[in-house]
Image (cartoon, rainbow, N blue to C red):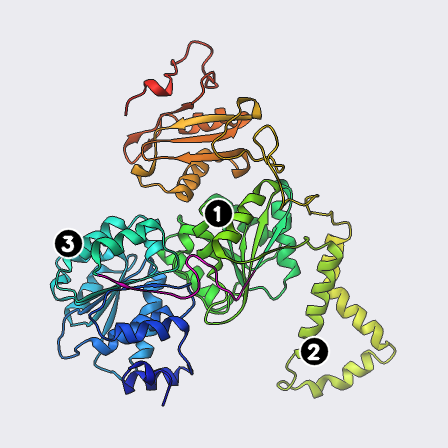
Amino acid sequence: MNLFEELGLKEELVKAIADLGFEAPTPIQQKAIPILISGTTDFVGLAQTGTGKTAAFGMPLLQLIDVTQKHPQALIICPTRELCLQICNDLQDYKKYLKSAVAEPVYGGASIVMQIRALKKGVHIVVATPGRLIDMIERKAIDLEKVKYVVLDEADEMLNMGFREDIDFVLKNTIKRESTWMFSATMPPEVRAISKNFMRDPQEVTVGKKNTANVNIDHQYFITPAQSRYETLKRLVDFNPGMYGIIFTRTKADAQEITERLNKEGYDIEALHGDLTQQQRDKVMGRFRQKSIQLLIATDVAARGIDVEGITHVINYELPDDMEVYTHRSGRTARAGKSGICISICHSRESYKIKQLERMTNAQFHKLDIPTGKDVCRKQFFHFMDKLMQADISHGDYETYMPDLLKKFEDVSKEEVLKRVSALEFNHFLKYYQNAEDLNARGDFRDRRPDNNNRDMGGRRERGSFNRDSGYARLFINLGTKDGFYKASFLQFILDESNLSKDALGKIDLREMNAWIEIDKSAAGKMIKAMDGKKHNNRLIRMNEADGGFKRPNDEGGGRKRIPVREKRY
């Protein structure tokens, strides 16, 4: 008996799975499928991306739907267009021998008229992004009353993207659903709240420990001075010539700047960020999936839902502030049981984040030295030699040219031919790296202890302390979580608006109605000038130095009076 058949799946699904080459279910499939095919049990599945979650809920849905009923019976909600299309493609594979079953993707960036027409023809499973789904509901193009099964895929990412109200709306209006299934890589309080508010005694299955990283990922980090971050990135890319990966940045400005610099130096790379149109985004993703480009550089928001097979490396150009974001970034590699590498470029003040990540992911992080110029040249040289020996010479009329080649090189030794071939390929590397500097930050930054000035030995203050003589100013801003921010999105917002580097910032204390930002005193004036008086979602932004004494650059002693924070009312 087939191992999938033992899970209770019917013959048509087992046969389709066998055609795809799957021999045994993954741990999440093995635990989830027997529960889900009952169709009556609410379910929470915690597992990393790339562990086979789509099959874990997709095959039970295909088994449960009644193909004679031409209306939506199952609703799968996911965070992005890319994931929406990926799920639909997977369902097409699983229903190979269930010709009558119809699954339809519904997402933004495509013609809503065409999608409405497809729904009117009759579908059984709708795979949708939250925003477009709400549009469909408001246009009465989809009837939620007959939906029996609701699946929330990548639930934590959807909540991070601000879709909480949309999810609540859908769950409140699918009143006849028989079960709700939620899949997530992590279990933050917001995900737990949905489980508590909309599920009845859900069965919870965890593959690995909660919030842990994929065990097939090798977590590496390199410590370099902040000003050497770009050169370190370039050297690590050169040191891994077969790399097919994603580089993550905090801001779209960083993504664009790094892309332009690397393109000028001859690298195959494109950026994915919020300023791209959907058509541009599709073009970039198409080239990346076809491996026409070696590297993709993206912000966290732009990269959500990316599901691409064979990614060997993920590089954190900067570590994220939200530790759960690291789990999602690293989960882009080591998918479907394969191994992968997640590289983080850190400066000396970020050593505490490595310790936090080790605790959160229950994984060991390996500190490695940044390769020297000679290391890079040696690695590139042997990579080229391997490619040379593996070149396919079985096709092509090479014999026609052999007499001329032999005559041309009759007085040239084999050693000289090899040197000349190497020179053609490696001259640029040898010249670039002949006087390459050491990019490693000196010292061991993993075992730092706080000193008497509330600083750890890497320069970062302990949480809860602020020293006015530390070189930092403390700024107040009247934006908080009530404005839709979480820590990572708030950080990206202030960096984008002020055009400042992350290295200028210290601790950020984000609260419901406001926030406090520690910033290098030399940059405080620039940030206040960039933020104060602007608007966010029609709300006037107020920013000033929380501890008093700071004047805006244009205040020559007679400018607007700064009101102490305690006297402000919002």
In the picture, the quarter occupied by the C terminus is: top left
- Can you say whether 59 is above or below 494 in the image? below
Q: Alpha carbon of mark 3 to alpha carbon of mark 1: how far?
A: 36 Å
The residue that label 2 is drawn on is 389
For residue 568, the mark is none
Instruction: Look at the image and tell me whether residue 416 can be seen.
Output: yes
Three-letter code, disc 1:
Pro
The dot on residue 320 is: 1
Instruction: Decide which of 185, 417 is in the foreground and name it.
Output: 185
Q: Earlier in the sequence, mark 2 or mark 1?
A: 1
Pick the front one: 192 or 301: 192
The residue carrying pointer 2 sits among few (fewer than 14), some (14 to 19) or many (20 or more) residues within 10 Å by Cα, namely few
Identify whether 172 is placed above or below 474: below
N-terminal of the pair, mark 2 or mark 3, is: 3
Q: Residue at x 71, y 59 (%)?
A: 376
Secondary structure of the residue carrying numbered label 1: loop
How far apart marks 2 and 1 lie (CA) works out to: 41 Å
Disc 3: which residue: 138
Residue 196 position, x and y percent, is 24, 54
Residue shown at the point (68%, 85%) measured from the top left = 398
Q: Using the numbered discs, state the Cα–Cα distance from disc 2 to disc 3 in whole angstroms.
A: 61 Å
Residue 322 image offset from top left, x and y in percent: 44, 46
